């Protein structure tokens, strides 16, 4: 993170994608925010795994990647020559979102705070850490699913657990896979997998799995 040499403009791109908390077309970023993510910026942020991007028609679809959500938990440098007030405003906003607002929100990560749906568990959370993590996974999956039993990609799920070591989350997913009504499976059309999908996959049953589904109550 420190040493990634992000420019003020690249840091600002991460803030915008955090606020959107979804996949958004570069054309929409231009129309809504007058923000054009050019190829050098896109390539750099993708190489750092801060942003996931894919070709969509004549433009690119972008969203904050799992490491991007983790990066947002740290300090960003918005210093920009000739725009010190703007840089100060963005620094204050990002710092206080992380250090004050997040702590009061009941969310564990900025990904949860900016989620389009509430991913916090509505039922009492078990006292044991393993059970509590499993409850978070179930809650997040149900919030992200279009309907009970619908597939949710692990690429979409993982950013909500930026505060959890990957090995712990993988173990929680493996435990959950043994529960009734829970299915973890590979993507049937491997050609649709992005680099972010491949990185988010869970090794289970001798194969790489990309999707999670949890049935209704």
Image (cartoon, grey):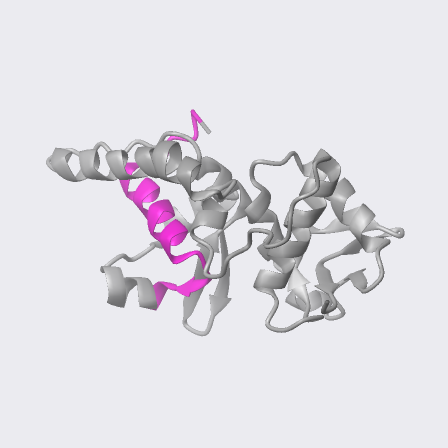
Residue 67 position (above or below residue 117): above
Q: Residue furthest left?
A: 82
Q: Is residue 140 left or right of residue 82?
A: right
Quarter of image, res 141: bottom right
Q: Is residue 208 left or right of residue 140?
A: right
In this rendered view, identify the residue nearer to me: 147 or 71.
Answer: 147
What residue lies at 65% left-to-right and 63% top-to-bottom? 152
How many numbered marks are there? 0
Q: In the image, residue 23 lies at what x, y percent? A: 46, 62
Q: Is residue 178 left or right of residue 85?
A: right
Q: Residue furthest front?
A: 124
Q: In the image, residue 196 lies at what x, y percent? A: 60, 52
- The answer to whether any part of residue 48 appears in the image is no
In this rendered view, identify the residue nearer to me: 60 or 214.
Answer: 214
Q: In the image, residue 174 lies at what x, y percent? A: 81, 47
- The answer to whether any part of residue 88 appears in the image is yes
In this rendered view, identify the residue nearer to me: 94 or 209.
Answer: 94
Quadrant including the C terminus: bottom right
Q: Is residue 16 left or right of residue 188?
A: left
Residue 13 position (above or below residue 180): above
Residue 144 position (above or below residue 92): below
- 66 magenta-colored: no
What residue lies at 70% left-to-right and 36% top-to-bottom? 127
Q: Residue furthest right?
A: 205
| The residue stretch that appears in magenta | 2-27
Q: In the image, residue 180 lies at what x, y percent? A: 85, 61
What residue lies at 51% left-to-right and 43% top-to-bottom? 47
- 13 magenta-colored: yes
């Amino acid at each position: 993170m420190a040493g990634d040499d992000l420019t003020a403009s690249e840091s600002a791109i991460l803030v915008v994608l955090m606020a959107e908390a979804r996949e958004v077309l570069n054309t929409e970023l231009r129309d809504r925010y007058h923000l054009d993510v050019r190829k050098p910026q896109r390539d750099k942020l993708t190489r750092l795994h801060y942003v996931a991007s894919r070709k969509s028609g004549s433009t690119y679809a972008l969203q904050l990647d799992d490491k991007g959500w983790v990066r947002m938990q740290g300090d960003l440098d918005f210093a920009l020559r000739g725009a010190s007030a703007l840089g100060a405003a963005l620094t204050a906003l990002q710092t206080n979102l992380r250090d004050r607002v997040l702590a009061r929100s009941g969310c564990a990560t900025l990904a949860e705070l900016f989620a389009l749906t509430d991913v916090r568990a509505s039922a009492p959370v078990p006292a044991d850490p393993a059970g509590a993590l499993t409850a978070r996974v179930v809650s997040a999956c149900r919030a992200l699913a279009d309907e009970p039993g619908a597939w949710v990609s692990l690429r979409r799920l993982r950013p909500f657990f930026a505060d959890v070591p990957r090995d712990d989350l993988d173990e929680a997913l493996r435990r959950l896979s043994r529960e009734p009504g829970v299915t973890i499976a590979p993507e049937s059309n491997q050609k649709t997998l992005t680099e972010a999908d491949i990185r988010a996959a869970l090794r289970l049953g001798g194969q790489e799995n990309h999707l999670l589904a949890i049935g209704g109550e």
